[in-house]
Every structure is written in C-alpha cells, then in structure tokens.
Image (tube, rainbow, N blue to C red):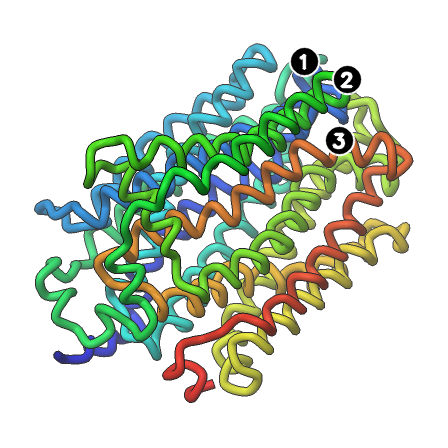
Amino acid sequence: MSSKPRLSFWQIWNMCFGFLGIQFGFALQNANVSRIFQTLGAEVEQVPGLWIAAPLTGLLVQPVIGYFSDRTWTRLGRRRPYFLWGAIFSTLALFAMPNSPQLWIAAGMLWILDASLNVSMEPFRAFVGDQLPSRQRPTGYAMQGFFIGVGSVVASLLPWLLAKWGVANTAAPGEVPDTVRWAFYAGGAVLLLAVLWTVVTTREYPPQVLASFDDAEPEGARESAMATVPGAGGGVPWLLAGIVGIGLVWSLAWDRMLYVLAALPLAYGALRLLAPRVVPGSILAALTADLHAMPATMRQLAVVQFFSWFGLFCMWIYTTPAVTALHFGATDTSSAAYNEGANWVGVLFAAYNGFAALAAIAIPWMVRALGLRGSHLACLWLGGAGLASMALLRDPQWLLLSMAGVGFAWASILSLPYAMLSDSLPAAKMGVYMGIFNFFIVIPQLVAVSTLGVLLAHLLGGEPVRVLVLGGACFAVAGLCALRVRLPLRREAEA
C-alpha cells in the first residue's frame, strides 16, 4: 500500500474554500434567526422551540448524505455533487427567509435552509479525510476553520455595516428590517460562488484508488468496517425509557418542549427494534450497524461534543436577548435600542469568528506543543471564561474581549475533534461516520432547545445572560472530557 501524497498549501486552500460560503449561510442564520423570530412575534421563551428545526434537520440529513456520498461516483466525483446541490438550495432559502410574512413560515424556511446547508457541509468534512494524509489533516481542518472564521466575520457584520451605509435598520412591527434582508441576499450569492470555486478547482480520488492507500483501514477500525446489525433486544430499554419520559411530561403537565427530550430514547429504541427486520444492506440497517460499531475514539469524543455544542447553542440562542436586555436595556423588538443591540450582537459574532480565524492559524502550532487533547482543553477553557465574563461586563464594547476566548473555543471545536476522529475511521466509511458523528452535535442541540426555556424560566430567574454562564461551564467540562479521548497508537506517538 502507498501513502497519500502531500498536498500543497494552495491545493488545501481550494478544497476548503467552499466552507467560506457555507459558513456565510450558517453565520447569517445563527446571528439573525432569533431576531427574525422575535420580530415576527415570538416570545423569548418560545425562541428555543422555534430553533428545533436546525438540529432535527442535521440529525436526519447528515448520516443519510454521508451514507450516499460514500457510495457515489459521478463525473463530478464523490463528494462534490453534494456540495453543489446543497449550495443551490441554500442560496434559494437565504433569498426567501427574510421575506417570511408569518412566524410559522420563517420556522419552515429555517428547516429548508438548515437541511440544504447540511447537504453541503457534511461531505466537506469527509472530503478532508479522503484527500489528505494523516499528518496534514489537522492543517486541513484548521484551514476549514479559518474559512469558517472569515466567512462568519463578514456575514455577521453585514447588517451592522449596511446600517452604517444608510440601509434602514428598523421596520414596521412584524417586518424584518432591510439590513437583514440585504445581508441574506448577499450571503446567498457568496455561498454559491464559494462552493462553485471548490467544485471547479479540485479533483477526487476514485474509490479504488482511495482503498489502496495505507490509511484506508486504521488500527482499531476493523470492527467498524465490518459492522453488523445489532440485535433488537437492546432497543427495548430505550423504548421504555422514552415512553416513561413522555408519560411523565404529559401527566405532570411539564413544559411541552420536554417531549423532544423524551422522544430521543424512544426514537433510538424504535430504530434498534426495526433495523433487524428490514432488508439486509438497506440504508436503515447499515446506519444502525455503523452506529452500534463506532470506534472507541468516536464514543469518547461524543461526550466532548455534547458539552461543547450545548454551550454553543446557549450562546447562539440567548446572546441577542441577553445583550439587548442587559447591555442596551431594551426588550421591545421595534425600538431603536433593541435593533442597535441586535446589530451589536452581529458585531460580537463577527468578532469571535475573526478571533477563530486567527486561532485556526495558531492551532497547528499548538498541536505540536500540547498535542491534540491538550490544545482542545486550552481552547475550550478560554471559551468558557469568555462566555462567563459576559455576565460581569456592562460596557458592550468590552464584550469584544469575551469574544476572543469564544473564538479560540470555536476554532478548536471546528477542527480538533475531526482531526482526532478521522485517524480512527475506515476510508470506505468516512462519509457515513462523519455524518453519524453529527449526532453528537445534534443531540446536545435538541437537549438545549427542549430544556433551556424551562431552565431560564424556573432556575435562572428569567435572565438570559445566566444561560451564557451555563454555556461557559459546559465548555469547561468539555475540555476536561477531551483529556480522556484515546487516540490511535500512531497519533499518540506523534503527539
């Protein structure tokens, strides 16, 4: 077997450039969707429930896209057809969303937008694992992190910049301001053009060539490569747990968002019961088998991802209501103060993504000095300190300092878990396992949207900034969990 050839800086640049556009879409979504929902009449306690479309879409779409992209070979290659079609539909959704006339339409457009973005994004993660040798993967994922940072800076700043250039930043009650509309239009164009650049300037290894490289089946990955469908018996406890949870929510009249939390074990139990009864080799059987046989490194990283992404969702959902209320003293979504504060949140999100772009340049050097796990711990703790500090600061300008720590955490979350994971995955299943790995991003998001409203109302005194402190604590826990991730022996020796 031969080793994959090392790629040049510009080859890695081209293969990652499309992430600039994808993150344009995600950044506009993360910074402005809560604002759109509130503008269309949503109460602050309702916002997490309206966000549920995003994680549910990722949960369903990414493993399926990974499964099919592993089995695809066309004139455009293996992963690139998914980049292209996802970008086309994402662009159309970005054009439509700020024109939603009612709240339920905006929630539906979020579903379409997030599904399309996920169709493009998931194969990009596997693309790096396909194309790069093991030693270059941290650099490849860090390059993706760099483009994510740059794209997010510009996208998050767009409403603020447009307001500075004279575009109207307020509108009649129930209407989205022109600053947000034009930001979404520009984002759609950038997304499509950036992904087209990667599609046109890159090539892919055919499946038979990919299978001939020496990293096609890493040590410890044989069980994953030969996965079989688990027995149905293991699904019964999960199914019962889900039924009991739903019964408790109904009988005790708990918040209805907790139905989402109870439905998670119910769905997994049903999947385990159903999988042995479907046609062998079908997508459902294959995904269940691969999920059951995931590598040990992936299981350990699942805990790290849970706390990391729960913390991120705390920030994405509640930064706008926290900053507008605490630092700008406004809760009326049609007031100038609220919209000024909402625009400042865009600046803050741009700032943490800008710091993330700088951190992405530093992370390969951090890995050489501290190893993958030590670097991830350091970055996550900086992010935790940044989020927690937002409750102590009163001058909104000083919140830029908080974003410096968040930027390091964000850059690390986008790169180092994937670098640790990709060395443990068989090449033939790189796509499907990257998709399954998304479960451990989506599950904490579902837990967040189903519990944060309850926690805010009953434990956190209705103060959104306390949710940000909770997110900082989750980053700290995630960093500690990173230390117990077991890396392949070859990677351990390099570290």
Q: Quadrant of the N terminus?
A: bottom left
Q: Is residue 247 visible?
A: yes
- Residue at (55%, 87%) from the top-left corner? 369
Residue named by callout 3? 453
Residue named by callout 2? 253
Image height check: is 366 above or below 442? Answer: below
255 left or right of 18? right
Q: Pointer 2 and pointer 3: residues touching (CB < 8 Å)?
A: no
- Tell me the crowding category of disc 1: few under 14, some 14 to 19, or many 20 or more residues within 10 angstroms, Cα based: some
Mark 3 is on which residue type? Gly
Image height check: is 131 above or below 34? Answer: below
Which is more toward the observer, 79 or 288? 288
Mark 1 is on which residue type? Gly
Measure the alpha-carbon separation of dots 2 and 3. Answer: 15 Å
Disc number at residue 174? 1
Q: Earlier in the sequence, mark 2 or mark 1?
A: 1
Measure the alpha-carbon separation of dots 2 and 1. Answer: 31 Å
- Tell me the crowding category of disc 2: few under 14, some 14 to 19, or many 20 or more residues within 10 angstroms, Cα based: few
Image height check: is 311 above or below 182? Answer: below
Measure the alpha-carbon separation of dots 3 and 1. Answer: 23 Å
Q: Which of marks 3 and 1 is nearer the N terminus?
A: 1
Where does residue 307 sit, x and y in percent of width and height?
64, 54
Where does residue 325 sit, x and y in percent of width and height?
85, 35
